[in-house]
Structures are given as structure tokens and as C-alpha cells.
Image (cartoon, coloured by chain):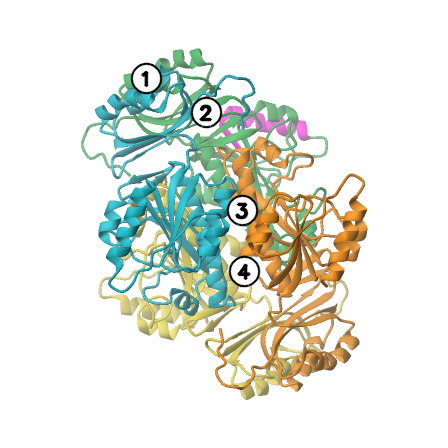
Chain colours: A yellow, B cyan, C orange, D green
Amino acid sequence: MRTDEGAAPATPSYVLVLTCPDGPGIVHAVSGVLAGAGGNITESQQYGDPGTGRFHLRVQVEVPLARDELAALLAPVAERFGMEWSLDVLGRPLRTLVLVSRAGHCLNDLLFRQRSGRLPVDVVGVVGNHRDLEPMAAAAGVPFTHVPVEAGGKEAAEARLLAMVGEHDVELVVLARYMQVLSDDLCRALHGRVINIHHSFLPSFKGARPYAQAHGRGVKLIGATAHYVTADLDEGPIIEQDVHRVDHASTEADMVGIGQDVEAQVLARAVRWHAEHRVLLDGHRTVVFR
Amino acid sequence: MRTDEGAAPATPSYVLVLTCPDGPGIVHAVSGVLAGAGGNITESQQYGDPGTGRFHLRVQVEVPLARDELAALLAPVAERFGMEWSLDVLGRPLRTLVLVSRAGHCLNDLLFRQRSGRLPVDVVGVVGNHRDLEPMAAAAGVPFTHVPVEAGGKEAAEARLLAMVGEHDVELVVLARYMQVLSDDLCRALHGRVINIHHSFLPSFKGARPYAQAHGRGVKLIGATAHYVTADLDEGPIIEQDVHRVDHASTEADMVGIGQDVEAQVLARAVRWHAEHRVLLDGHRTVVFR
Amino acid sequence: MRTDEGAAPATPSYVLVLTCPDGPGIVHAVSGVLAGAGGNITESQQYGDPGTGRFHLRVQVEVPLARDELAALLAPVAERFGMEWSLDVLGRPLRTLVLVSRAGHCLNDLLFRQRSGRLPVDVVGVVGNHRDLEPMAAAAGVPFTHVPVEAGGKEAAEARLLAMVGEHDVELVVLARYMQVLSDDLCRALHGRVINIHHSFLPSFKGARPYAQAHGRGVKLIGATAHYVTADLDEGPIIEQDVHRVDHASTEADMVGIGQDVEAQVLARAVRWHAEHRVLLDGHRTVVFR
Amino acid sequence: MRTDEGAAPATPSYVLVLTCPDGPGIVHAVSGVLAGAGGNITESQQYGDPGTGRFHLRVQVEVPLARDELAALLAPVAERFGMEWSLDVLGRPLRTLVLVSRAGHCLNDLLFRQRSGRLPVDVVGVVGNHRDLEPMAAAAGVPFTHVPVEAGGKEAAEARLLAMVGEHDVELVVLARYMQVLSDDLCRALHGRVINIHHSFLPSFKGARPYAQAHGRGVKLIGATAHYVTADLDEGPIIEQDVHRVDHASTEADMVGIGQDVEAQVLARAVRWHAEHRVLLDGHRTVVFR
């Protein structure tokens, strides 16, 4: 949106996110550091959760300093308030690994948005436990790796995944209809860095063929939920949810199709917000600074 | 929408609804009777459910006959195809009893719509197990009856309800946030004539204080479901559902308020469709001819 | 949500809103005053509009000072940055006058929400240019004033309205389907204090009977817009909008009914956000800190 | 959804759609032909428009006859009632030509749905007045033709389009963000066979850069409309519309991105309904039998 015509370099922009126990003086201290560094805050959102007692802040700021210089100025304040924090260059794409099985609706949507410049991620690879989506990855110029999960071979498959995460310095793993359950160990190793998408119904249905159950029960809404994957919970902190309307004439196949649309849209929003550092963990909840 | 200026009486309009085993010739037979009677079909919807094998039809028709004359013509066809059917004067208000406890958002909404001519029901009475909503009923000119449900006194209370249903020839009972569970016997006695409304979440929450649980879990949608009350099911056939968006900053009280809005709207739609004979039972599902 | 059991008085809570030219140091200066006064910020939102160059801030804060003491501390900062600002006791109901004509759907909704504690307004009176809604106001215990607008008598009618605004120290005027156009003079006199609601369609329709036009055109969505009333613009800054789905079988009367539902809901949200000091003017736009 | 395991051929399924002046006996006559031919109606919807006086019917039916045999049986009834009608094999993909310019969000969505079996169209070609989307078409294995529209060369370009329509016997032309206005002659030649998608706002904005205007005006909803292209109207009969929510912090670029999502979804629904013969013209309106 900005045009820098002359030779003068643009002031760098950063995004600072932090979480700490709530209390007086936090914003004043942080804004003091930024003002002292000649910073200009362009966007800022905060939320103190009375339930968890945690304070959350996200700031976009233009500062005429290198990232590490600014980080060094912020470190004492972070220390004083016991902050978990991160400082990133605004708009830097996150190195992302996408895991898939056979269904391509989420992968197609993510790759198109990434290529259109609407999703700040750098997809370093697509991993499939089946080969079905290899052509789709190839058409987008993204390396595809086939990591089958044989009976008894989950441990080996996850070791390969972790190796790829390490090798490519992966910051985000997206389960784009990856039909394998991650082990508790892998969940813990990648805590806060794995986003999953699944269908959601009112009421919820246990067991096999949930769309058949939803159809048999005559639900009027088909939904999807994007969430972080955790080991401890049946389902981790929710990032985004949405629904679409169906009616009695919707077949089970119609419902599956509508469910796929909702899944692709909800997952895309969750990935974008995460990649823009807009999602903060707050106990079992998320704070989403949209 | 139509103005009949002269002396000629308007042709009466009826709504015919029927359900029977699916098979060839049903529409042809019914339309034959209606055409033979000089009828003009103004609205018609049908649905054959491949899952249950049931066929459903709703027809609005102008016929220059009295209701009973038309019914007599239809009876042989109904007999032949094994139909469950009903024939009513189009727009006739259903005699309706509304049951409430303390929360008035649904009752206020129903009464306002009824008075505005947007809900074809005749509210013959409001029954509360508490007295809180007596003034609201009084302001609308509707009789209020206090039927408390003491410990051990549910049987007596339900006997009073059934007596009122009989006395006023009640066709529809609306549980407008009535916080008592109906006994299986009462459910069976009023099968297909009782509509309930409750909140719905993704995921669903068991146990006390569901809004507190939903808040603690960080859900992004608050919903409501209107359904028929049945004895056999945890929850009967769904008539309508909807959701509204919340976020991390929504307090539990905000969520309760939003939930109340959704409940009132979903219940109003379900009651209107039922009163217009647009909802047909199809096994555990409903067919809603909107 | 909080119970203060002992004798200790609760710390008072305030809401501060301000708008000023954007620039460095604003948040730091304001948070400095609040921290120095022993304040605890419980909610804060800010937005700098790159288009208008205006900075907007809303802060909820607990401070152990009287309102005027805190205002005195803030005044020098406000002066320094050229702020338009206000400081109010959190949750104080706004003195509100509601103007109506014949349709009661918005008035009924507002009055019910106010009585249910979900709308922080004190409705000091209802003014109608017709008498139709006098009983509805009476049932809610709100004084009703009949101010007819005769041909050639708009000036006199508006003088009575302004007198009532002065007499009751009215802070907010809600046009709840008031079918009279306010004069430019009245718009200017009440700038930023009058909220209107109207239907909205895609595409929009000029001229009489917009629902008939929308029906004839086969629109699939019926919407409503709540906005501030201004003299200069055809339509003032938008506060909130929403839509509801219709289809080919929806009659013009159905569309009117659905339009009324959307209008009532959109107006209620706009009034609540305004009364909670969540809506700030930003040129021809609004900033809404929900 | 059905598996025919043995040697017996499945009974063919057809979709019959018809429009004619409303009057008694239509359904009875049509259902008589179908019943006489041993047909089993699996889905049927009808609508008589009191405004236009037109009756509309869509029937899915299994009949043990070839298409032309069934058509011959229906022809006398069609003649008698003055019907515009069509009879097609259920699920037959429509031969479709997609016209594009530079933006690929709609084309990507359509091609993915088609390949996933969720859009019953056979995309015989993509035509672009720019070459930007040639690789996207190539990746999907669809022929791409570059038909530039030079200044003064619209006539020649449209002649090429019409030639392609003739050569491939094209049944549907989709303007998937094709940024050229079709001439009146072309509109007439392809009447009822061209679907366009455009953004929609409340209020609407004339002139250049509508997203900039919408942003400057602070709209809270971004929408899209899919419609048939006609010569006579500024905008033809609407097939589908939808909106998505934005707020004050949404940049113009955010709004463009959200608008693209809505456009792709609305266009996909319109194309699917058209290809399934669910959309009937009714004067300036459409009847959509979803």
C-alpha cells in the first residue's frame, strides 16, 4: 500500500506478541521502550483474561532498528514481567509443512492462497501418507514426500516427520485432512505449532461415518473447527469455527461437499491468523487478535 | 395480498400435508382429486427420503368446497396409499400453550410476533412453574397459570398441564425455556406436538453451567436448536438450528445474551413453520417445507 | 459478575475514549497517567487509521479516584495531543429518547433488552408522530409523547423534540423506524447522537416500495444498516449491518417480516455499542471496538 | 450412492424442467405421463409465481425409456399447456466455456470442484483476454485460448468467442472475473446461458475502485452476486448472493481478499445449480430449486 520512491530505505516493521501475568504497568513499560526507540505503533491489541489472569498483547510497530537491537531493548522489560514473547519481521512468511492424506480440498485452497499472496507462509513441503495429492503439489512447484504409515510403523513415520521439521527449520505444521493421529510425544515436541481441521456438528457424533450420522439425525448446520493439536486434550484450543446451512433434501454426499468447503475456509483463516502472529494461547483457549 | 372487492366470497384455501410409503402414482392420484374438485394449487412441495423410504407432500390449494367435503374426496386416496395426513384451513391459528420458567426472552419474542400477525398461533395460555413472567403475559392479555413443580410433585403438575391441554383443545405446546424435564408419559401423550429450544455448542458440553464450559473452552460460535420433544431420544427430531459468532473477549454473560437472541429467533422460526404445517416427521429427522 | 461481600467499597471503573491525530507517544502518555493514578486497565483497544491519520483509543480502567479527579489528571495529556475525549463511569446507562411511527418491532426489542439488563440505556421517553405504540410504551412504564408532524409543521415538531432533549438532558436519540426526515439543523444540533436504522438491499432500490422492488428483482438477501444521522450525507457513518437469506418463494410480506427481524437486531447492536462508548467517529467511517 | 452389482442395467434417470402459464391440471397431466411410462419420481419441486403468473416445475424421475422416447410422450402435454421445457439425463455434465482476465480465484475454485466431481460441468476450454491464467488451465489439463480484446477489436473478439461456442456446442459460458462487457448482440445470442459474478456492497458504489469507496465508507459487509447476463438490464436475473463480515481494521486489500472468497463461493453455487437444471427464469427473477 506504500510507495517508497526515492533512495531512502523504509523503516522496518515488526510484530511483537507477548503473554504474561496481568498487572499494572505492562503497556506503559512496553510503550516506553518502543517510544524510546523512535517507534511508531501502527496496530495494537490487548486482552487481559479475568479467568486465567493472563495479559496478552500484539503490537505492530515501525522502528529504525534491526530486529536484534530492538529485541535487546525489550528483553529487560520481558524479564521484569515474566513474559513469553516473540518479535518478528512483519509479513515474514512462516516456514510451513503441510500434511495430507487423500482429500485435496484443503491443500488446493492453501496452495492457491499462498501463490496469490494472501497467505504469508512458505510451504517448504507437502507430506502425504498416500500419493494421491502428489500431482497437486507438483503443479504448485512444492516438493512432495510420501511417508506411508504402515501398521506398526507410526514411530518410524513420525521420526521422518520430525527430521523434516528439523531439516527445514519448520515453524508451522498444518494437518490439511491428514487422517493419522499424532502420538503424544510428537504433539508435545511441536506444541503450539500444529494446526488441525475437523468437521463439527450440533450435536456432535461419536464413532464412524459422522456425516451419515448427521444426515440420519437431520442436522440443519454443517460446521468445521480449526484448533491447535495437543497431547493432553481430546481436542486442543480452538482457533476458528464456522458453519453452513443444509436441509432435509441434502444428501450425505451434499453434506460432505459442504463440509469440505467449510473446512477449507476455516483452516485458511486459522493458518493466516497464526502466520500473522494473531493467535495467542491462553490456557485451553486462544486469544485471536483479528 | 389479495383484495376481494365485490360480493363474491373468496374461494377457501386449504393446506394438505401427508406422509406415506414412497412409490409411483401418489402425486398423480392426489392432484387428480384436487383437479377434479376444481382446485387450484398455489404452493406444493414434496420429498421422497431414500433413507426412510417415506414420501412427504405439502400442498396449498384453493377449492370451492367446505373442508369436510374435500376431506371426504381425499379419504379413499389416503386409504389406498396408507397415508398419515391432515387437511387444515390455510392460516388458521393453532391453539397454543406456552410453558415458561423465569427467562422471558423467548416468551417476549413469541408474544410480540403473535400480536404483529407474524405467527399464526392463538396463545390460549402461558403456564409458569415460577411467577416471574406473569406480568409479561398480562401485558399481552394472555391468561397466566402458575403451576409450580414441587419436589415429588411432578406427576400432579403434569396432570394439571394435561387437563389444560384437554380443556383448551391445545394443538401445540411450546417449551419457551421451561426448565423442567417432561416425563416419558407426557412426551408420548403429546407426541409431535411439543417444541423445545435449547442452546447448542461446538463441541457440546455435558453437565452444569454449559456457558461457563463454553467460555472456558474458547468456542467461537454460540448456537441454538429447536426440536420436537420425544420420550425415547435424548433429543428429538431437529426442526431448526442457528449460530452466532463470539470471540475471546466475549464474557460468559455476553455469551448468555447472544445465546438468548439465537434461541428466540430459532424458536420463532420453528413455531411458525410448525403452525403453517411445514414440518413433517420422517423417522428421527424432520422434513421442513419452507 | 463480581461479589463484593465485605465493607470495602469497590474500586470505581471508567471508560475512556479518545481520538486525535496519530503520532508517537500517545499510548505511552495515557498509560502513564493511568499507571500513576494506581489504575488497572481491564480492556483496551486502539486503532490508527492510515487513511484519515486519526488515532482512536478505548480503555476500561479501575482507578481509586473520583471521575473528576481522574479527568483532571488526563486533561493535560489530552491538551498536548489535541484529543477529543470522554471519560464515563463504566456501565452508566445513557439517557435515551426513542422516536417511533407505527411499526413496533424495533421499539419492542429495545424495551425488552433494556428491561432485561442487556442494554445500558435509560429510556426517558418514547415520542411518536402517531399514537399506535403508546400502549407498548405504557406496558414498559415509559412515558409516551405524541408529537404529530402536520403538513408545514415540521419546524414546530422539531422544536418540541429539541426541548425534550434539553429538558431530560438526552444523550442519545434512537430513530426506531421513525418515518420522518430530520432537518439539517436538527441533524447538526444532535451530531453524533442520533442513530437510525433502515433496510438495505443488493442492489439498492430508489423510490417507493423498496420491498416490492426487491421482490420483483428476486434478491436473495434482505439486510439492514444502522448509522449515525448527518446533515451532509445522504447517509451517515455506518455502525452495523447484517443480512438474512430469502428465496424465490418468499413473498413481499415474508421479506418485510424478515427485514423487521434484521432491523431490530442490527439496531439493538448499534445502540448497545454506542451506549458502551464502543463507537468512535473516524471521518465518514466508524471505528467499532467490540 | 447406489451400487448396481449384478448385470441388470440401472433404470435411466432424467431431469425435467418446465415453465408455463399457471393454471389447473398441469401437475396432474405431467405426473400422468410419467406414471404411465412406469416412472418413479425421486425429487420434485414446483412454484407458481402470483406476480408473473408463471408456473415452474422441476422433476427428477427414473423411467425405463430412452430420453427421446420419454420426450415424445411429454411433447403433447407440453404443447397443450404452452410449456418451455427441457429433458436431460440426470447428472450429464454441461459443456462449459470459462472466460477470464487476470484474477484466478474463481477459475481455480471452479477447476478444483470440477476435478473433485462436485461440479457437473465439462470445461471444454478457458478463454482469457490476458495470458496470466494459461498455466492454471494447463495444470488442470484444460485448453487455454488467448483472445485479446484490442481497442476497436471487440467485434472480432466476440466473433471468435461465438465461433468457439458453436464449435464445441457450448451450453454454458461462465464469466469468472472476465473484465470485458459483452455486447448486446452477444448477450442476446447467448440468452440464459451466460453467468457472471460481481462484488456487491451495501450501499452500492458507482464508478472506479469500488473497494476503495467501500473502505472509505466503512461498510461492515462485503458481498457478491451471481446473475445471468442480459442485454436489456443493467444487471440480469440474480441466481445467488452472499456476504462476509469486515470491520474498521480491514484494509482495502483485506476487503479485496474477502471479496474474492465470496465471489468464488457464490459463483460455484450458481454454476452448480444451473448445471443441475435447478435455475429457471421467471421474468426478471429466477426460481432456484435447491
Residue that numbered label 2 is attached to: D56
Do the residues at discs 2 and 4 belong to one chain?
A: no
Q: Residue at x 54, y 35 (%)?
A: C253
Is residue B174 shown left or right of residue C167?
left
User: Magenta residues, as a range?
Assistant: D154-174
Is residue C233 shown left or right of residue D123?
right
Q: Quadrant of the C terminus of chain A?
A: bottom right
Is residue A13 shown left or right of residue B6?
right
Residue that numbered label 1 is attached to: D32
Chain where mark 4 sits: C
Chain where mark 1 sits: D
Vertical placement of D255 versus D141: above or below?
below
Q: CA distance from mark 1 to mark 3?
A: 43 Å
Q: Mark 4 Cα within 10 Å, few/some/many (few <14, many 20+)?
A: some
Residue A60 at x, y percent in the picture? 62, 71
Q: Is residue A138 visible?
A: no
Secondary structure at badge 1 equals helix
Q: CA distance from mark 2 to mark 4?
A: 48 Å
Q: Earlier in the sequence, mark 4 or mark 3?
A: 4
Q: Residue at x 46, y 75 (%)?
A: A51
Secondary structure at badge 3 equals helix
Q: CA distance from mark 3 to mark 2?
A: 30 Å
